[in-house]
Image (cartoon, grey):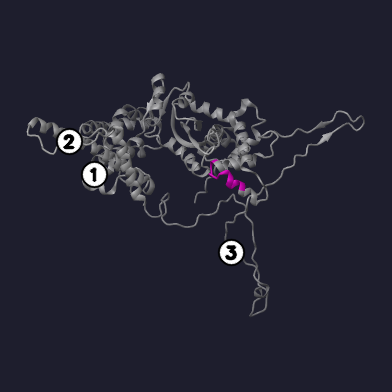
Amino acid sequence: MGEARRRAQIRARETAARAAGVVKAPAAIPEQLPDDVADCHRLILELVAQLRREQTLSAGLQQQLARLLKARFGPRADRLVPGQLLLCDLEALLKSETPAAPPAAPKGEPGQKRNGGGRRPLPAQLERVDMVHEVPEEERRCQPCGVEKKLIGEDISEQLEFRPGSLIVIRHRRRKYACPCCQEGVVTADKPFQPIEKGIPGPGLLAHVAVSKYCDHLPLNRLEGIFARQGVEISRQTMCGWMAGAAEALVPLYEREKAEVLRGRVIQTDDTPVPVLDPEYLKRTKTGHVWTYHGDPRHPYDVYEYTPTRCRDGPLKFLNGYNGYLQADAYAGYDAIFRERPAVKEVGCWAHARRKFTEAQSVDPLRASQAVVQIRKLYAIEKEIKGLSAAERRNIRQVRSLPVLAEIQSWLEREKIQVLPKSPVGDAIGYAINNWQALLRYCEDGDLEIDNNNAERDLRGVAVGRKNWLFAGSDQGGRTAATIITILMSAKRHGLNVFAYLTDVLARMPGHPANRIDEFLPDRWKALHVAPPVAAPAR
């Protein structure tokens, strides 16, 4: 049924395209062919033009079908189709661009990675509870001589157990004092600052709900059931209000991280759609967008922003005053930034260029596979120089990557005139040529990356989360989510325990001096609160 439905959809789409004039109706073939040579040539040209249009439409539909089938059933990675290596001598190209493997270390040499499995030891920081298992008394007496046996040691094995989390009630008892003589001058101890004024949730409970929803992707209705099992009824509407209050308390830290990202030299950005409940039609959803702005290593924060639409006003407003490199896909909304602000330099994404050729392998396997192999050479170089300084990366790219890029450019110009512009491989070639200067720019600065994958990885959690919590309740709910996700994902980028970090921030930020907000930035917080790992003793 599924295959029949897909074929019916393709036929319906083709019929709609004909009706809309995108594809012209086939040229009418007369019953009696003309005798005049000029009329025959005209008829042949019409039929050839129609055949080309049909081939273009068919190729596009085949690519669309292959992309949908791959998204539904196949791997998501951009890889060569295995069977296409037989069409040309790509194996030699693959071998030529694959770096030689380092010689294997002798067995037993320090630093060699051991093969095989084995159970990992349980973390040392976990609480240990000893359960002593005693030998029965009748077995502790020696049978031959009747003397009681002495303890000579014990066998210790560890078992990992789970202790369910629990809710507790903290009673704030504020002492009052007064003069015993005149009963005047009554003083009362101050109550600690609360994340939500006059609210009952403590910072730990707020952090638990936020981490559960935005990191572990648990919708609030499931949390409602989890709390009910502990005997506490907390409605999802109440928890929505808590998240709004927590986001409001975190706004100063959000703005501080945003300012730091805009001070950087490089920003990677991308966006993803999220369904949002439409206030005009409560049973329908509209499409909002969450944008991520990935800061460079000197400003290591991931800032998210919600916009009701995908128009250019969102990134244009967020990046107001920014001067540096902006790496993104070829979305037309960024063009206004590059046009109106010459100080902002566009950096292209080779992952997007490669993806178009990968998707075209089902239609034109020879050309698409050739392009993918050439792009893999660039990635092989990037793999070798990972971890080097910015200056070293730039120098190696100038020597090794630029010649490969020149070969790719020549191949693109040569193949451009051989393919139909609207065919899948023609579209991939056109994308690369139209964005060539942006794709070339990563070679001019060692701080730049070859692709925009960091920003795409930042949005993976949002994509997983929307499958669970289904939709945001409103545009304000989208902004609330963007604020909390910014704080959590920036902490996660630094390897922090996001629950411990957010609990401390919510507990201390309301009464913290505004001029010391930098103490809550995840890298500064980590330096103050997380002890460096202890080196293992040398053997």
In the image, what residue type sits under mark 1? Answer: Leu
Residue 213 quadrant: top right
- Which comes sooner in the sequence, label 1 or label 3? 1
| Residue at image point 47% right, 27% down | 314
Q: Residues within 10 Å of mark 2 (few under 14, many from 20)?
A: few
Residue 390 at what x, y percent from top left?
40, 31
Viewer-proximal residue among 167 and 325: 167
Q: Amino acid at mark 2?
A: Val
Residue 327 percent location from the top left of the image: 40, 30
What residue is pinned by disc 1? 90
Side (left or right) of 231 relative to 349: right
Q: Is residue 276 above or below residue 84?
A: above
Q: Is residue 53 visible?
A: yes
Residue linked to disc 2: 48
Instruction: Indicate the quadrant where residue 216 lies.
Output: top right
- Of 79 and 382, nearer the camera is 79
Secondary structure beneath disc 2? helix
Residue with the mark numbered 3 = 155
Which stretch is magenta? 214-224
Which of the marked residues, 1 or 2, is nearer the chain's N terminus?
A: 2
Q: Are marks 1 and 2 in contact (CB under 8 Å)?
A: no
Instruction: State how far apart marks 1 and 3 are (Cα).
Output: 59 Å
| Magenta residue check for 352 | no
Q: Looking at the rendered structure, which numbered label has been put on residue 229?
A: none
Give above or below for 237 relative to 324: below
**Disc 1 and disc 2: Cα gap in Å?**
33 Å
What type is the residue that disc 3 sits on?
Asp
In the rendered structure, the answer to whether residue 91 lies left or right of residue 124 reads left
Please say if 219 is above or below 442.
below
